[in-house]
Amino acid sequence: MNKKFVILLVLILCFQSTGCSGKDNQKEIDFIRSYINEEQYEKAIVELDEYNTKNGRTLDEEDYYYGVCYNRLGLYKLAEEAIDYYQTDHDDIKGNYEKAITLYGTADYEKANQLFESIKDAYLDNPEYFYYYGNSCYYNKKYADAARLLEKAVNLDPKQHTYNIDLLYAYSELEEYNKGIEACNNYLKILGEKKEVNSDERDQLEYQRGDFFIMPVNTKLL
């Protein structure tokens, strides 16, 4: 067989193999992104792990994706490691946003608030941003700021029940009981619209709503 023909055949086979591998890799990356968009963070992590096992650490933003997943799962120390690693080679707003969430999650509220504030112009339409920023202010005992930010989160996504319940807590600290009752009622309404309703959670909220009705009276008596 002609040597030139053999070399050409080998090159063609190598190219086809690489091309298929590239397509497979892109498909895996698309799976990872779709899982994150669908808030299936555990599955996204499994895909990331499998990708790394097969290809090594070749994905440019894999540490960012790990950070996003760990943050949403409340695994803030793991998220911090991933985002810190990502930020050694990247200086961008999305990395700073995830870093702010890890600072909040690891109870470094002052730094978290500073970082949230520095990127606010990029997240004016993002309810999750106001949720995390508001909670960071709440735990930093800046209750008026917490209420203001959580109100924005609720306005942007009124069907997200966790925003309403955390807004209730902020109102409680500010002794704005009527607003607290409204937030609690919104929370219960959202639960009522869901097919899967946690009865214990509902009972707890009903009890808490009762406290809000009683609190203003007790305050006047003291």
Image: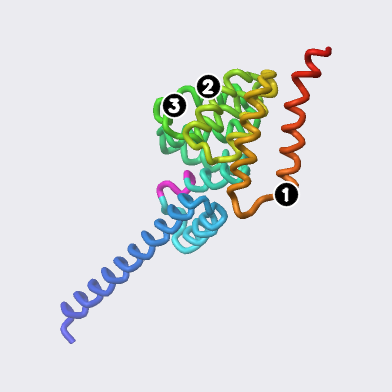
Is 61 left, or right, of 7 in this rendering?
right
Identify which residue is drawn at 48% across, 52% down.
Answer: 38
Instruction: Inspect the magenta stretch and tell me whether residue 187 lies in it.
Output: no
Mark 1 and mark 2 in contact? Answer it, CB < 8 Å.
no
Q: Position of residue 52 (x, y in %)?
A: 49, 58
Identify which residue is drawn at 65% across, 25% down.
Answer: 170
SS category of the residue bearing label 1:
helix
Q: 157 or 121: which is nearer to us?
A: 157
- Residue identified by numbered label 3: 119
**Magenta span: helix, strand or loop, mainly?**
helix
Tell me the crowding category of disc 3: few under 14, some 14 to 19, or many 20 or more residues within 10 angstroms, Cα based. Answer: some
Q: Position of residue 209 (x, y in %)?
A: 72, 32
- Residue identified by numbered label 1: 199
Residue type indicated by callout 2: Gln
Nearer the observer, disc 1 or disc 2?
Answer: 1
Distance from Cα at disc 1 to Cα at disc 3 = 39 Å
Identify which residue is drawn at 47% across, 41% down.
Answer: 86
Q: Position of residue 73 (x, y in %)?
A: 60, 46
Q: 198 or 153: which is nearer to us?
A: 198
User: In this rendering, does residue 15 appear at all?
Assistant: yes
Residue type indicated by callout 3: Ile
Q: Quadrant of the C terminus?
A: top right
Distance from Cα at disc 3 to Cα at disc 2 = 9 Å
SS category of the residue bearing label 2:
helix
Residue type indicated by callout 1: Ser
User: Which mark sits nearer the N-terminus, 1 or 3?
Assistant: 3
Q: Which residues are magenta?
A: 60-64
- Residue identified by numbered label 2: 114
